[in-house]
Amino acid sequence: MAKKDQIRALLKSIETGDLDAIAVINEEKYIQHNPQTHEGSEGLAALFQRLSKTSPRVNIVRAFEDGDFVFAHTEYDFATRNIGFEVFRFENGQAVEHWDNIQKRLGPSPAGRTMVDGPTEAADLELTESNRALVQSFVEIILIDGRHDRLTDFIDTNNYAEHNPRLSDGVSELRQALEDVNNGQRLINYQRIHRVLAEGNFVLCVSEGEFDDVPSAFYDLFRIANGKLVEHWDTTEKVAPQSEWKNDNGKF
């Protein structure tokens, strides 16, 4: 099985309790970066079986591979409905490290889009590296440096579809959101890129910063066509203070 299909099966086993799917994880080496999860306190097999008895619903909307990494876009219903991105690192055929970013499901957006709808299959695989570079430059120049005058260098102004539940389609609304301030500080404040993962025309950027003055993790998924950004999905999650972490691995 492809690595991304193994991760699809793993995440689905939260719903089904399928023990075979958990074999993709090397639990002896597994590093957990969700600060709210105890590491080593409960084996994944026992955890997933316990969760499966609560009648959860798990839908893996998209899954992509980038070398040793798999990144997936998911929706969960564990009493509350959430949208997440999951990132796994593989080593010697097994997953040995995990990061995620979870947000309550909101919306639809003013344009009627949900947080997960839209195309799901990667294309233009030969353009993976140029698309990765495009997204990295966009985040560095626009989101970190605040060069909003250059938005149209990166975004297809005629075909930009926005899935953030607070925003409508188009560049003007995005620019306004990026320029919103609270007490003199940018409401959306990107500070550092941690990882840029790509397969074909889909690129996920993992960044750190602040949202409304609260330390936050930003996961932004972009679809690219003809050298421009044409679609965007995201989740924003508060980074809990270190005193509240249940493991010492860090969010990023």
Image (cartoon, rainbow, N blue to C red):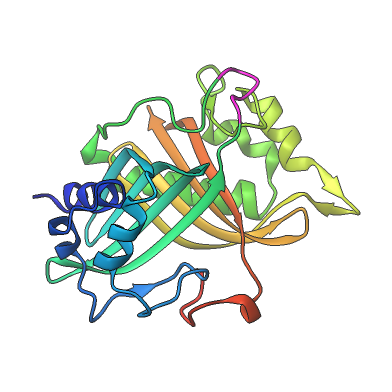
Image height check: is 248 above or below 6?
below
Magenta segment boundaries in residue numbering:
107-112
Q: Is residue 96 magenta?
A: no
The front one of 25 and 58 is 58
Q: x, y (%) of residue 240?
A: 63, 68
Q: Is residue 110 magenta?
A: yes
Q: Is residue 158 left or right of residue 243?
A: left
Residue 18 seen anywhere in this rendered image of the structure: yes
Q: Is residue 210 left or right of residue 105?
A: right
Residue 227 seen anywhere in this rendered image of the structure: no
The front one of 246 and 41 is 41
Q: x, y (%) of residue 15?
A: 30, 46
The front one of 42 and 241 is 42
Residue extending furthest toward the front: 53
Q: x, y (%) of residue 160?
A: 53, 24
Q: Is residue 197 left or right of residue 249?
A: left
Q: Is residue 102 left or right of residue 8?
A: right
The residue lying at 12 percent from left, 71 percent from top is 92
The residue lying at 66 percent from left, 29 percent from top is 167
Q: x, y (%) of residue 21?
A: 16, 56
- Where residue 179 sits, quadrant-wise, is top right
The residue lying at 29 percent from left, 75 percent from top is 30
